[in-house]
Image: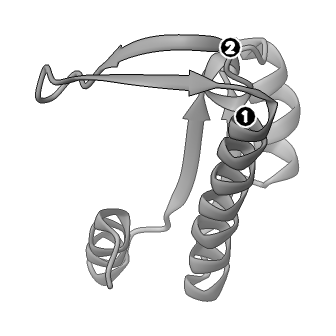
Amino acid sequence: FSQGYEDGLRALQGRGHEVTAIQVLAPDEIDPPLMGDLKLVDVETGIPQEVTVDAAMKDLYRQRLEAWQGALHAYCTRRGIRFIPVSTGTPWEQLILSELRQARVVQG
């Protein structure tokens, strides 16, 4: 099945744009600080869900995040799209002056 990002990236390339995908995640998304018995609320539906977060659940989350990032990176590579994962914990200057230069997104 097609992911939503695939359609958007294909459309941009189809219009002749040079595309770079920058995935921005907060440190808490990369390594959630949650542990124990929790009630989480879906921000879209407002429906609460009680969950227990333990070490095994966190490991599963990390595995799924890595798999999703791997699939996104693989898709971008197949299409000739630069893929850059970035944490909001990365200083702006480092992102611009180092990481985006290394990926040849910015030059100078």
Residue 44 location in percent, x, y?
Answer: 15, 28
For label 1, the residue is: 58
Q: Residue furthest left?
A: 45
- Res 34 label: none
Residue 75 location in percent, x, y?
Answer: 57, 78
Residue 57 location in percent, x, y?
Answer: 68, 38
**In front here: 34 or 88?**
34
Instruction: Work out whether 45 lies above or below 8.
Output: above
Instruction: Work out whether 30 lies above or below 107.
Output: above
Q: How is the image coloured?
A: one colour
Quadrant in which the C terminus appears: top right
Which residue is located at x 70 percent, y 48 percent?
60
Task: Look at label 2 and name its amino acid.
Answer: Met
> In the structure shown, which secondary structural element does the residue marked by tag 2 occupy?
loop
Say if residue 48 shows up in the picture: yes
Which residue is located at x 58 percent, y 66 percent?
72
Residue 80 location in percent, x, y?
Answer: 61, 81
Quarter residue 39 falls in? top left
> In the structure shown, which secondary structural element does the residue marked by tag 1 occupy?
helix
Task: Look at label 1 and name its amino acid.
Answer: Lys
Q: Are marks 1 and 2 in contact (CB under 8 Å)?
A: yes
Say if residue 108 shows up in the picture: no
Which residue is located at x 83 percent, y 38 percent?
99
For label 2, the residue is: 35
On screen, residue 24 versus residue 97, left or right, reads left
Measured in 3D between alpha carbons, the distance from the residue under mark 1 to the one under mark 2, in whole angstroms, is: 9 Å
Quarter residue 9 falls in? bottom left
Instruction: Work out whether 28 lies above or below 58.
Output: above
**In front here: 87 or 40?**
40
Q: Earlier in the sequence, mark 1 or mark 2?
A: 2
On screen, residue 11 versus residue 53, left or right, reads left
